[in-house]
Image: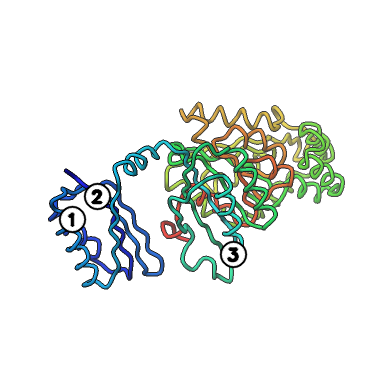
Amino acid sequence: MQETFLITVSGSDRPGLTNAFASILAEAGATLLDIGQAVIHNSLTFGLMVQVESDMTASLIGALEEEARSAGVKVRIKPVSEDNYREWIGEQKQQRFIITLLGSRITAAQLASVTRKFTEYGLNIAVMDRLSGRDAASRAENPRMCIQFALTGNHADATALRQSLLSLARDEDFDIAVQEDSIFRRNRRLVVFDMDSTLIQMEVIDELARRAGVYDEVSAITASAMRGEIDFPTSFRRRMALLKGLSGDALDDVANNLPLTQGADRLLRTLKMLGYKTGIISGGFTHFARRLQADLGFDYVYAHELEVVDNRLTGEILGEVIDGQRKAEILREIADKEQIVLAQTIAIGDGANDLPMLSVAGIGVAFHAKPLVRQKAEHSISLMGLDALLYLLGIRDRHLAD
């Protein structure tokens, strides 16, 4: 006859501690059912669930307690009934979520607010871990903190949970992402970006307008379109008409001074290293997107081709207007070409015309977005650089070079 025990060890971490207890269990012929460990500031807690023959129970418990005294740690040995063991096995079918909490710094009050929501939705924290570096929150420049929660539960409304947490994040000034824990979360393969105000910290058309002397007029139309007040094709053609006659030399002047968004180069280096396909799907212009492609290594570029005659802009483009629906179609086309299902894709943008693309992607991220976009997108990053996307993929700072 076999008995089941949950063994929990806690104390100061040191090499060989796990091996010492595992060796005792090995001598008793124990079978391992579960294991877990966490270390915070050299303070260790690890647990093992084991089955052992009943006639070995007394000697095993004595040996474990003696090892704990010798090692200066605490051990707790708890019998597990057959009913509790079967209940534990059944929990494999529970809902599972990955919640990513991000901010320049995370306060205890913010942590309390977030975990209170977990309780409200009947979710239990299975694993809680820090993805950011040990010194990241204390840096004078670019401070950041990221905590990842693995949650389990039953019958939680995923949509309501996401909306509730996003609302809380807006009110309490942090970012949060809610993902259902599936095989696709660990197997994303394609990331596409809007360009203006996402990859670069400017609206290129506004900079061209500045050089054409029509900045105020163009900027007003741009802002209205990004707020979703007028459709993108209409706003685009109005703005293009105002650029008619601008010298082609202005294009190179702007292209030579594109301000990359913080974290963009680090993010693209990492995605390329990990084998991701990347693309730009922009309502901007290929003249600038190609420059980013050369600098950052994008696999795909879709944007507008400006018509230039005698080194002057005609106020027209060559080809179709890339509006919001076309962006979503292009994402699907790239995924089909790469034989990637949409659940394996990520899209990042800031404007209303990005929403269709964000909605069809496996993960759609509103980046430093307008209020309307942030409200409608499933995920939002507003307080950190583009490389915060790596946290949503579960990538730790220590695995990457800054």
Image quadrant for the N terminus? top left
How crowded pointer 1 is (Cα within 10 Å; few <14, some 14-19, many 20+) is rated as: many
* Left or right placement of residue 90 versus residue 209 in this view: left
The answer to whether the residues at label 2 and label 1 have Cβ atoms under 8 Å apart is yes
User: Which of the colour schemes (rainbow, by chain, secondary structure, one colour) is used?
Assistant: rainbow
Residue 97 placement (x, y as % from top left):
49, 43
What amino acid does circle 2 point to? Val
Can you identify the residue that label 2 sits on?
50
Of the image marks 3 and 2, the number of the one nearer the N terminus: 2
Q: Is residue 53 visible?
A: yes
Residue 76 vs residue 329, the one in the foreground: 76
Of the image marks 1 and 3, the number of the one nearer the N terminus: 1
Query: For residue 108, what is the image quadrant?
Result: bottom right
* Left or right placement of residue 375 versus residue 43 in this view: right
Can you identify the residue that label 3 sits on?
107
Can you identify the residue that label 1 sits on?
25
Residue 158 placement (x, y as % from top left):
57, 38
Residue 275 vs residue 238, the one in the foreground: 275
How crowded pointer 2 is (Cα within 10 Å; few <14, some 14-19, many 20+) is rated as: many
